[in-house]
């Protein structure tokens, strides 16, 4: 009886060994598979990062190229405008504030004046210091009071922010963009424009 028990135990032990080998093989395959999956995932991520970096660099290069093109276009446009301007008055932008500044000019013995000031939006506005309506009185010039320009003939009050914008009525004669050039540092007023508009100052008594 004891002998049979021993034989049964040996058979059971013998059968368990192959099962253990199978388990070890399965576990080994599972571990290898996990490492393989991790490796593939990492490689895929690196590949995606490389692609994204390449795309980003390409976009940045394209954007920088467009900015350079725009700068060149603006420079060319400025140079083209400047070539048509005969300098008469040069206004240094750094010296302009919200307090109006006056620049004299003389055309064939007629004294003229250009005014310049900085509007609330930060832009520099320029105009002739004479009124489009009251100029013939000789007193249609402006004096600043606060944020307004006041006509010395009729007393009309004109917002400083409208200088160079409003046309017609009692306000300073605007200087068109085609009659001046802004190079970023200074504004140059065209001599031909001033000479053509000297009649506005024919009776000027400022």
Image (cartoon, grey):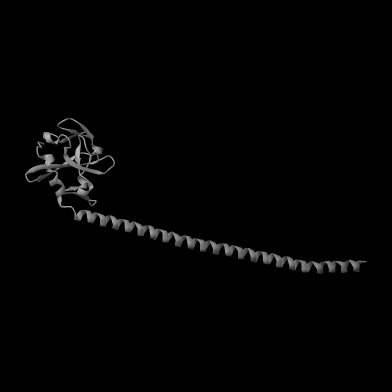
The residue nearer to you, when weighing 17 against 119, is 119
Instruction: Tell me what residue is drawn at x 12 percent, y 41 percent.
Output: 199
Q: Which corner quadrant of the image does residue 37 belong to?
A: bottom right
Q: Residue lying furthest top in this view? A: 155
- On screen, residue 155 above or below 49: above
Q: Which corner quadrant of the image does residue 112 belong to?
A: top left
Q: Which corner quadrant of the image does residue 4 belong to?
A: bottom right
- Measuring from the top left, give residue 13's x and y in whole percent: 81, 67
Quarter containing the N terminus = bottom right
The residue nearer to you, when weighing 112 against 60, is 112
The residue nearer to you, when weighing 84 against 26, is 84
Relative to residue 51, is residue 38 drawn left or right? right
The residue nearer to you, when weighing 54 against 203, is 203
- Measuring from the top left, give residue 194's x and y in whole percent: 14, 46
- On screen, residue 34 above or below 98: below
Quarter containing the C terminus = top left
- On screen, residue 132 above or below 40: above
- Measuring from the top left, give residue 135's x and y in whole percent: 14, 36
Q: Residue lying furthest right in this view? A: 1
Q: Residue lying furthest left in this view? A: 109
Instruction: Tell me what residue is drawn at x 24 percent, y 54 percent.
Output: 78
Instruction: Tell me what residue is drawn at x 45 percent, y 62 percent.
Output: 54
Instruction: Tell me what residue is drawn at x 89 percent, y 66 percent.
Output: 5
- On screen, residue 49 above or below 197: below
């Amino acid at each position: 009886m004891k002998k049979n028990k021993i034989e049964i135990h040996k058979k059971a032990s013998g059968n368990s060994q192959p099962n253990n080998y199978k388990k070890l093989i399965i576990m080994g395959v599972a571990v290898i598979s996990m490492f393989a999956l991790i490796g593939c995932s990492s490689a895929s991520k690196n590949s995606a990062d490389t692609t994204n970096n390449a795309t980003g660099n390409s976009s940045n290069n394209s954007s920088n190229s467009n900015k350079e093109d725009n700068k060149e276009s603006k420079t060319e446009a400025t140079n083209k405008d400047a070539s048509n301007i005969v300098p008469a008055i040069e206004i240094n932008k750094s010296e302009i504030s919200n307090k109006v500044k006056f620049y004299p000019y003389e055309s064939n013995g007629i004294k003229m004046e250009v005014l310049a000031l900085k509007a609330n939006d930060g832009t520099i506005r320029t105009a002739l210091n004479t009124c489009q309506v009251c100029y013939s009185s000789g007193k249609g010039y402006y004096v600043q009071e606060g944020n307004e320009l006041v006509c010395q003939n009729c007393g009309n009050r004109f917002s400083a922010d409208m200088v160079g914008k409003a046309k017609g009525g009692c306000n300073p004669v605007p200087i068109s963009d085609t009659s001046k050039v802004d190079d970023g540092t200074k504004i140059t007023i065209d001599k031909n424009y001033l000479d053509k508009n000297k009649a506005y100052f024919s009776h000027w008594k400022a």
